[in-house]
Image: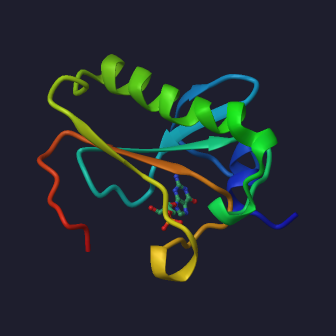
Amino acid sequence: MNCLFCKIVNGEINSDIVYQDDKVLAFRDVNPQAPTHILIIPKTHISTLNDLEESNASLMGLLPITAQKLAKELGFADDGYRVVMNCNNHGGQTVFHIHLHLLGGRQMAWPPG
Ligand code: DGP
């Protein structure tokens, strides 16, 4: 499968990995939008939020759990942070392997652009 994030999972493309286990990989975004910008992905390929099934619930639950652990480890959990999942064109998704953005280290604005 010609998927950029699968290639990162497989080590075919280098990334700045901050956490991984058998199910989840977290690595720094190449184009950070905050002082800390980490992408958290399932190691198995799921393209978009639209492709999720009930059977993915426990796997997907690991993404925000990983986000809060990293936010605590990196020291911005109490100040706060943002997690974002973009879906398809209107959501601004550009890489079609589902991912949770973890953004921290600055004041976020609302509404988002
Ligand atoms: P999204 O627009 O929600 O699909 O986010 C995709 C993110 O992936 C975007 O913030 C930039 C990041 N990205 C794209 N290519 C690479 C890459 O090769 N390495 C890393 N670390 N991040 C990438």
Relative to 64, is 50 on the left or the right?
A: right
Q: Which residue: 60% across, 29% down? A: 62
Question: What is the quadrant of the C terminus in the image?
Answer: bottom left
Q: Which residue: 11% across, 48% down? A: 107
Looking at this view, name the residue that lies furthest to the right: 1
Relative to 26, is 77 on the left or the right?
A: left
Visible in this render: residue 103? yes
Looking at the image, which is closer to me, 87 or 12?
Answer: 87
Relative to 44, is 60 on the left or the right?
A: left
Q: Which residue: 66% across, 32% down? A: 24
Looking at the image, which is closer to me, 12 or 25?
Answer: 25
Looking at the image, which is closer to me, 111 or 6?
Answer: 111
Q: Is residue 15 above or below residue 96?
A: above
Locate residue 46, reporting x and y percent. Answer: 75, 55
Q: How many marks?
A: 0
Colouring rule applied to residues: rainbow
Q: Classify residue 97 by image quadrant.
A: bottom right
Relative to 29, is 95 on the left or the right?
A: right
Looking at this view, name the residue that lies furthest to the top: 73
Q: Classify residue 1 by image quadrant.
A: bottom right
Looking at this view, name the residue that lies furthest to the front: 54
Q: Which residue: 68% across, 65% down? A: 50
Locate residue 94, reporting x and y percent. Answer: 55, 73
Visible in this render: residue 43? no
Locate residue 52, reporting x and y percent. Answer: 73, 54
Locate residue 90, reporting x and y percent. Answer: 47, 81
